[in-house]
Amino acid sequence: MAMDILSGQSGGKRGLRRWPWSRKKRPGPIFDDLDDERPLSPLYDTVPGDPERRRIHDWPYPDPEDGGGPLPPRKHTRWWWVSRGFAVLLFLFILLIGWLAVTAPLSKSLEPIAPPEITLLAADGTPIARNGAVVDQPVQVADLPPHVVDAFLAIEDRRFYDHWGGDPRGIARAAWSNLTTGRTQGGSTITQQLAKFTFLTPEQSLTRKAREALIAFWLEAWLTKDEILERYLSNAYFGDNTYGLRAASLHYFYRQPEKLRPEQAAMLAGLLQAPSRYAPTRNFTLAEERMGTVIGAMVEAGYLTEAEAAAMPVPKLDVRDGSTLPTGTYFADWALPEARKLSEIGYARQTITTTLDARLQNAARRAVERAPLGNAQVALVAMRPNGEVVAMIGGKDYAQSPFNRATQAHRQPGSTFKLFVYLAALKDGWNPDDRIENRAIEQGSYRPRNASGNYSDSLTLEEAFARSSNVAAVRLFNEVGSEKVIEVAREFGVTSPLPEGYPSLALGTSTMTLLELTAAYAGIAANEFPVVPRAFSAEEQGWFDWIWNPTGSLSAREHGAMEKMLRAAVNRGTGRAAMLRVPNYGKTGTSQDNRDALFVGYAGDLVVGVWVGNDDNSPLAGVHGGGLPARIWRDFMRQALGEQVAPQRAQPRPDPSGPVQPMDVPNLGDLPLGDLRLEEIPLDDQGTRLRIGEDTATISTEIDGVPVDIRFDETGISLQERGE
């Protein structure tokens, strides 16, 4: 409120507007001396329409001589502060409850803290691996004998039923014992231990200890004491990869926990402090000493008398675990993460059937064992055209090196990457009969050379792919463009980095896994891509999946042309050593300096990739994709498809009465050979092949690891090195 200084009347009564800062319940105005000549300040204002009159605000401003200043802060009552403080505490409490609900859900304490045991089966039901913790069904406190519960309470938390998650007396007792006896004794309650191994990491810090206390109070607020004890006993670690009292009692004594004897319960209770150290299967003496400590604690707590403790015998172990299954194999290690996703959360042990074919896995093992690898490593992966992996070899010896070179090693695919270059060209309108220049590249910063050192004016795409011409592939790559080549590779499921604008990409200089590369070739075999490698049978897709997850396919022209070139690479190209009696398709690959050698192809309903190389990426001596990898591929496929090595043919007896005599045939092409002119005839198990043409016969073999062609024609015999 503002007052007229001369009249002493309220400004409101004189029809003056009230000031915004006026207050109704303030006492009357304080009048200053009218003779005061101090200049006006925010404290004084002139009355509108009468400059002789002045009025004073009804609360004091700072003295103008002191420089004035802002409005003074309002003074708050004690109740105001109490109410605000309560609101802040309530807000923090709600945040704490929300944090506990998210980070420590009560349902998590009902789950095993370690992934339960999973047994993986081959497609025919043969067990192949067993991995995971040994767990069993939770226990119920009401069903356990008193001496079982007493043993754990005596050594772990005597005042369990009297505290609210934390026990100051227990902490003080543990600290005193540590100081006086020299033995380390923990002060955590059973509730705190449940909070620690269920919700927290093993780190040692004050922050983790504070979180442990908060979660312990949270558990005590929502669970009964018996529920806390049950979850603790059902998840605690007892050594030997065994979690939970039921699994431990069955493992060590082959007895259900409801039927444990007092001495057995005492020994199991003693394991919790250091399970790996006190496990009786490893150190029975230490386990027996620790059992004595538990019995002494039971006497101190009043659960046993001295006489009962003295009469308690040492229990005998009854371990009956006779599993001989490996905990891991190359295939099992790759399949296990997906198996965990498929398994249900719980304590039950589970058995899951995989796509692995036991017969084909053995065939792959034999093919690798028979190969003259020397110090080199090897990888093999075989899958169906739909991506179901049926065999996998990740190295020569899993026990010595579990690193999976089929799924984890990123190596250069070499000329097997040319598949995407030629596919891009086909999609761009090229045909297998179109010609591409095959002269040496003499200009530019990148000048690749053919492995054989042989060049020509030009080749058809089919010939260039079959002979694996590097200069032709680079020229075709430049014609099509790196963007289209990379796009095709992505369509076929390649996810590894592929740099744009680098012509060397055409020769497979970017790394990828063998599994990734083989799946891309499976897309050609099925003419449906991308193919996703899987260790478990895929569910049949419904119409909704077809709409939201469409797959690609090549046109009939593109697919037929690509298969024609893949077939040519095996029939008369660098992949002759992989020739089978059934139609087969494939491509060889050798990286720079022979650091990687590959063969990837398909026949029947199998798509198989083989890699040979050194782990240190050093060059291979005389090994290339058309040699050892192709022979391993052929060896495996012969076993897989039931193809037997051709027996030695009996020499036919001469028939003088025959209608045709050798001298009657002037030219080789006049022989009645039928389709043999277009196919190759295997001569031995080392990849030697005979091919008969119109006027020529060619024997393809290897001499000291170098592939050569011995050609017979009208001009005589010629020897030519076969490049890749």
Image (spheres, rainbow, N blue to C red):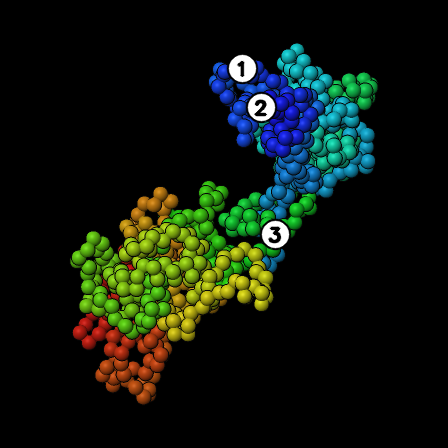
User: What's the distance in space between the residues labelled 1 and 3, CA to CA?
Assistant: 95 Å
Question: How would you rate the neighbour count of disc 1 (Cα within 10 Å): few for under 14, some for 14-19, many for 20 or more?
Answer: few
Mark 3 residue element: helix
Circle 2 packing at 10 Å, graded few (<14), some (14-19), many (20+), is many
Q: CA distance from mark 2 to mark 1?
A: 14 Å
Mark 1 belongs to which amino acid? Asp
Look at the numbered disc 2 and give the secondary structure of its residue.
strand
Q: Amino acid at mark 2?
A: Arg
Name the spot of residue 279 as percent of width and height, x first.
64, 30
Q: Is residue 502 visible?
A: yes
Residue 518: x and y, percent? Answer: 43, 58
The mark nearer the N terminus, 2 or 3, is 2
Q: Are marks 1 and 3 in contact (CB under 8 Å)?
A: no
Q: Where does the image place residue 326, in percent across and percent down from the top left?
A: 56, 45
Q: Which quadrant would residue 138 be assigned to in this image? A: top right
Q: Is residue 672 above or below residue 301?
A: below
Between circles 2 and 3, the one closer to the viewer is: 2
Badge number at residue 187? none
Closer to us: 389 or 711: 389
Instruction: Determine whether label 2 and label 1 are within 8 Å by CB.
Output: no
Q: Which residue is at the front of the view, 501 or 578?
A: 501
Pointer 1: what residue? 35
Left or right of 109 in this view: 660: left
Which residue is the site of mark 3?
A: 342
Q: Residue at x 20, y 53 (%)?
A: 445
Identify the mark at residue 55; answer none if there is no mark.
Answer: 2
Please state if 475 lies on the left or on the right of 236 as rendered.
Answer: left
Label 1 vs 3, first from the N-terminus: 1
